[in-house]
Amino acid sequence: MAWFAITCFALAAALPVHALQLTDDRGVTVQFAQAPQRIVSLLPSLTESVCAMEQCHRLVGVDRYSNHPASVRSLPVMGGGLDPNIEGIVALKPDVVLLATSSRASARLESLGIKVVALEPKSHADVRRVLGKIGALLEIPDEMGAARLWRLIDTSVSAAAQSLSPQARALRVYFEVSRGPYGASESSFIGETLTRLGVKNVVPASLGPFPRLNPEFVVRANPDVILIGNRSMQAMVPYPGWGSIKAVKEQRICVFGVGDSDVVVRPGPRMAEAARLMAACLEKYATPGGAGKAR
């Protein structure tokens, strides 16, 4: 039996000393000999999640929209998340590429021998889950990574809600994420934040997370406050007929600037800050004399 023992020892020696595996949002299980040290991130929320766990130094490339924290702006830009620069990514020799499930790049990258993990948070529960997966991938203990971050997000959103007056919580709100108009419904992560703040979202969950609306829908809904989170908009551009909406007539409109807009429309570690920004807008318009555009 000595040969058997020797064979088993040889096989054991040939196996990686340490290995981990992760099942991504496609249902694909990806195996690693060790925690990735060279990461390309092609989704801003994933970039921010890696950095929120104090692992920015592992990033070697990002998509064109990843701009937080400031340190990632000096990294090589690999184009857009949906159709990135494949050749550029390969040249960076990453251990893994993090991208959205909707990206068209997964199959191409995998065919070139690049490991891909697709994660796409769309709800508060998704954010918690994705943070956990990134923490596991980076081998960051929960108390230093995902669990700590989620507790901070959760308690901070609750604190933002508790800061609102009864008058603010009585408001009816419309949140526009992009011209169209595209609204954030009750089922979106933005809608979930608004619900936790205690206000009424005029776009129901039944329409899907971010439906394109007929402008007349918003006229009929007649919200008390309009929040604009489209980073390309520097001013509120009303649609035909919107002059009759209460929020427009009374100038109860929050147009978030480019930086703040990034915060409120990304489902990631800055959702607590997003809740505070939205709460500040709502409280402003819940007080007498609170009309007038906020930026």
Image: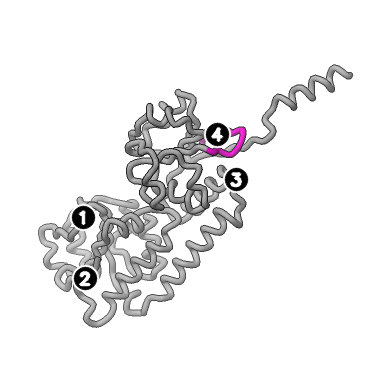
Please identify the dominant SS of the magenta region: loop
Q: Name the residue at the bottom extreme.
A: 288
- The amino acid type found where label 4 is placed reads Val
Dot 3 or dot 4, earlier in sequence: 4
Left or right side of 237 for 150: right
Q: Decide if residue 126 is in sight here.
A: no
SS state under label 3: loop
Dot 1 or dot 3, earlier in sequence: 3
Colouring scheme applied when the structure was drawn: one colour
Residue 91 vs 180, above or below: the answer is above
SS state under label 1: loop
Depth check: give the residue in front, 35 or 104: 35
- Distance from the alpha carbon under mark 2 to that under mark 1: 17 Å
**Residue under the image location 26 percent in, 53 percent down:** 231
- Point out the frontmost of discs 3 and 4: 3
- The amino acid type found where label 2 is placed reads Arg
Dot 3 or dot 2, earlier in sequence: 3
Q: CB under 8 Å between callouts 1 and 3? A: no
- Distance from the alpha carbon under mark 3 to that under mark 4: 15 Å
Q: Estimate how packed mark 4 is, as few (under 14), some (14 to 19) or many (20 or more) residues with alpha carbons within 10 Å.
A: some
Q: Which residue is mark 1?
A: 233
- Distance from the alpha carbon under mark 2 to that under mark 4: 48 Å
Q: Position of residue 184 (x, y in %)?
A: 31, 56
**Residue under the image location 32 percent in, 60 percent down:** 260
Depth check: give the residue in front, 78 or 15: 78
The segment highlighted magenta reads: 28-37
Which labelled disc corresponds to residue 30? 4
- The amino acid type found where label 1 is placed reads Met
- Distance from the alpha carbon under mark 1 to that under mark 3: 39 Å
**Residue under the image location 55 percent in, 48 percent down:** 135
Left or right side of 50 for 81: left
